[in-house]
Image (tube, grey):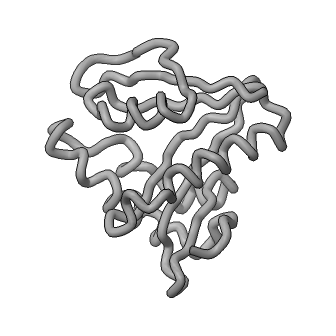
Amino acid sequence: MTGLRPALPHEGEAVRTLVRAAFAVHVPTLGREPGPMGHDWPACVAAGEVSVLEDEAGALAAVARLVPEPDALLVETIAVRPDLRGTGLGRALLAFAEEEARRRALPRLRLYTNALMAENIALYARHGYRTTHETGEPPMRKVWMEKKIG
């Protein structure tokens, strides 16, 4: 993999394609598309919220959307191309989010995932995130988690 970098303006549609492929696995569980599948990814790229990793051939491999808030950095989306799941790219993006929060002098990371996505909740817990609260109604109930940055 090549280094993490900001998504380029012309990559908005490629980011959308990667995110849709990454989140498609959750459609049967939720009975509908998860939120990130419907985002306006070209606008997110234009806003400077999206960072990407490339594979050796220069194709997008993983995407992180980080949105600064007054007291935290929101890890809005982490997406890894389906053929690269389990290769550590998600962990690399979470580590990048921590570095970015420190760089911005934000005291914590915040994220949410669907309550039905148990493997995501477990992954984030393994990386030091703790559940703070839940919002919404099933099947779109959100579990909010945060990690304090030392």
Q: In the rendered view, does 117 fall on the left or right side of 45?
A: left
Q: Vertical placement of 95 versus 148: above or below?
A: below
Residue 87 image point, x, y percent: 44, 62
Query: Residue sitting at 47 percent across and 54 percent down?
Result: 40
Please tell me which residue lies in front, 42 or 17.
Answer: 17
Query: Residue sitting at 43 percent across and 59 percent down?
Result: 80
Residue 38 image point, x, y percent: 37, 49
Residue 93 image point, x, y percent: 58, 52
Count of labels in the image: 0
Query: Residue sitting at 50 percent across and 46 percent down?
Result: 77
Q: In the rendered view, does 50 fall on the left or right side of 106?
A: left
Q: In the rendered view, does 29 fall on the left or right side of 3?
A: left
Residue 123 image point, x, y percent: 43, 37
Query: Residue sitting at 37 percent across and 41 percent down?
Result: 35
| Image quarter of residue 92 | bottom right
- Location of the N terminus (image quadrant): bottom right
Please tell me which residue lies in front, 141 or 57.
Answer: 57
